Image (cartoon, rainbow, N blue to C red):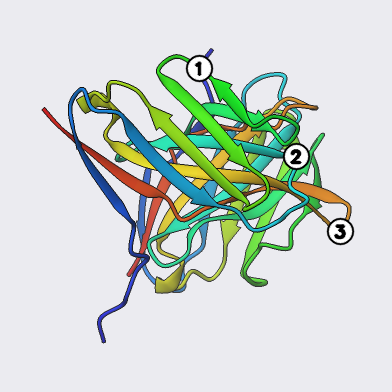
Amino acid sequence: DAGVIQSPRHEVTEMGQEVTLRCKPISGHDYLFWYRQTMMRGLELLIYFNNNVPIDDSGMPEDRFSAKMPNASFSTLKIQPSEPRDSAVYFCASTPGGNYEQYFGPGTRLTVT
Amino acid sequence: GESVGLHLPTLSVQEGDNSIINCAYSNSASDYFIWYKQESGKGPQFIIDIRSNMDKRQGQRVTVLLNKTVKHLSLQIAATQPGDSAVYFCAENIWSTGFQKLVFGTGTRLLVSP
């Protein structure tokens, strides 16, 4: 089992550029979560999907952030335009239905200059 | 000006000691709790969980205690090893507007000296 896969692992971009983060959940897991981790705010839930459908996006900071899950094995988190305050580590996690334990990916460290 | 980040509480122990990491949670209706371990440069990793109808659960070298009266959770690590050095997060499962989600605490850094 490869676990949750995220790409890229590191991303450095300039303010105003579009950033796309990618996630492949564990096969068979029907819940997918996007988190952001910063020193200022800790680990925050941004959005989560169940069976590819967004369920709760109340944590998405603003309209510059969007997330999609076109199929059960792929999700993207997009920031457009990016700003320096978006610099953080973004984690994707997945879990099978009926299970609370979430399995986290290695994260994408985003730096916006 | 200089930004101020979260001040992570730090617990420093010697190898072989027992460690106790504490967590206060916010929602008296939370029905499930998890402890995660996060090593530098990695994602959080599940350690142990407990449901609200229990007050103690044991794993291998770890024990979680739940005190619902004071909304307190603790993680006990027996015979702490240098490999246990990491940041430890508690998380509570809460229901909000019909949805459930894990809410994470700010974390405690555990430093184990050989």
The quadrant where residue A25 appears: top right
Is disc 1 surrounded by few (<14), some (14 to 19) or many (20+) residues within 10 Å? Answer: few
Is disc 3 surrounded by few (<14), some (14 to 19) or many (20+) residues within 10 Å? Answer: few
Chain to which mark 3 belongs: B
Determine the secondary structure under disc 3: loop
Assess whether mark 3 and mark 1 are in contact (beta carbons under 8 angstroms): no
Point out residue B26 in the picture as x, y percentages from the top left corner. 64, 58
Residue occupying image coordinates x 55% and y 34%: B65
Q: Can you say which quadrant of the picture contains the N terminus of chain A?
A: top right
Q: Are marks 2 and 3 on the same chain?
A: no
Determine the secondary structure under disc 1: loop
Point out residue A45 in the picture as x, y percentages from the top left corner. 62, 54
Q: Nearer the viewer, mark 2 or mark 3?
A: 3
In depth, the one of B41 and B5 nearer the eye is B5
Q: Is residue A2 above or below residue A5?
A: above
Alpha carbons under labels 1 and 3: distance apart: 33 Å
Residue of label 3: B97
Residue of label 2: A70
Check disc 3 and give the amino acid type.
Answer: Thr
Residue of label 1: B59
Mark closer to the chain start, 1 or 3 = 1
- Left or right of residue B47: residue A98: right
